Image (cartoon, rainbow, N blue to C red):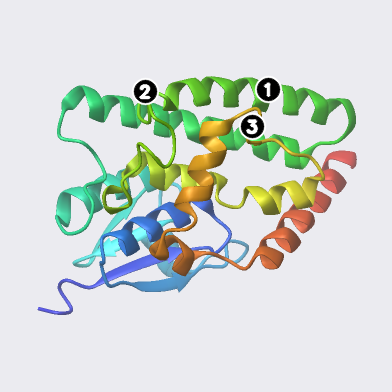
Amino acid sequence: MAEENKVTLYGMWSSPYVKRVELALRLKGIPYEYVEEDLRNKSQLLLKLNPIHQKVPVLVHNGKAIVESLVILEYIDETWKTGPQLLPEDPYKRSQVRFWASYLQQVFESMVSVLKTSGEAQEKAIKEVTEKLKLLEEGLKGFFPNGFPNSFDIENVGLLEVVICSHFGANEALEEALGVKVITPEKTPLIYSSITALTEIPAVKAASIPHEKVVTFLKFFREKALKYSAE
């Protein structure tokens, strides 16, 4: 029976998509085994578990593989009723959470563009991120009308908060690697305060990666991306 209920997460330490799944598992108190994958040399097991996209995260439960991070989060919420409920019961509220979680992903992808560019291209990317963050700031007001932490219940962290934390939790490391501040308490007070509050949650702290390790990775990623674009 224990083997039947076994949960295994296949991931890569630097992936925010893996991090969101790990956070959900920890917040719900679900025991799991973590298997680190080398995406430069993908294991045959990973290719078997996720033959379509061949990427992480992959969650295996009862011997069955679930892929795509947002799909996995919903699976976790529907399968385990312990801990916080990630999605609200109300259909409209659920739709809004799904929409903004998807939009958060778009914002993050734009932030990656800032990391991968320099000069005029980077200035353009920063402008795009700034505009998207403004829209996100306004959108989040519908969920947290009294701001953080006044509208935030640490016992009921939802899917949206998990996605915010996974994508923006390393904001300080990104600033250090770039030398540019994108999320600030002056420009995006709600986003900034949400990151501050969420990163103090014990389950989030337990899953956090050392700051210097993240900075080193981001600088390496940026250097490699700039070198590739120059070729």
Question: Looking at the figure, which quarter contains the N terminus?
Answer: bottom left
The residue that mark 3 highlights is 110
Cα distance between the residues tagged 3 and 2: 23 Å
State the residue lying farthest toward the left. Answer: 1
Cα distance between the residues tagged 1 and 2: 23 Å
Rendered location of residue 39, percent (x, y): 57, 61
Rendered location of residue 2, percent (x, y): 15, 79
* Lower position in the chain sequence, tag 3 or tag 2: 3
Please say if 33 is above or below 81. Answer: below
- Is residue 54 in sight in this rendering? no
The residue that mark 1 highlights is 128
The residue that mark 2 highlights is 142
* Lower position in the chain sequence, tag 1 or tag 2: 1
Q: Is residue 10 left or right of residue 64?
A: right
**Do labels 1 and 2 touch, CB within 8 Å?**
no
Q: Is residue 96 left or right of residue 38?
A: left
Q: Is residue 222 left or right of residue 30?
A: right
Neighbour class for label 1 at 10 Å: few (<14), some, many (≥20)?
some
| Mark sitting on residue 70 | none
Where, by quadrant of the figure, is residue 82 drawn?
A: bottom left
Query: The residue tagged with tag 2: helix, strand or loop?
Result: loop
Rendered location of residue 217, percent (x, y): 71, 60
Rendered location of residue 16, percent (x, y): 52, 51
Q: Residue at x 52, y 41 (%)?
A: 193
Q: Nearer the viewer, residue 68 or 124?
A: 124
Q: Residue at x 41, y 28 (%)?
A: 100
* Lower position in the chain sequence, tag 1 or tag 3: 3
Q: The residue under label 3 is which amino acid type?
A: Ser
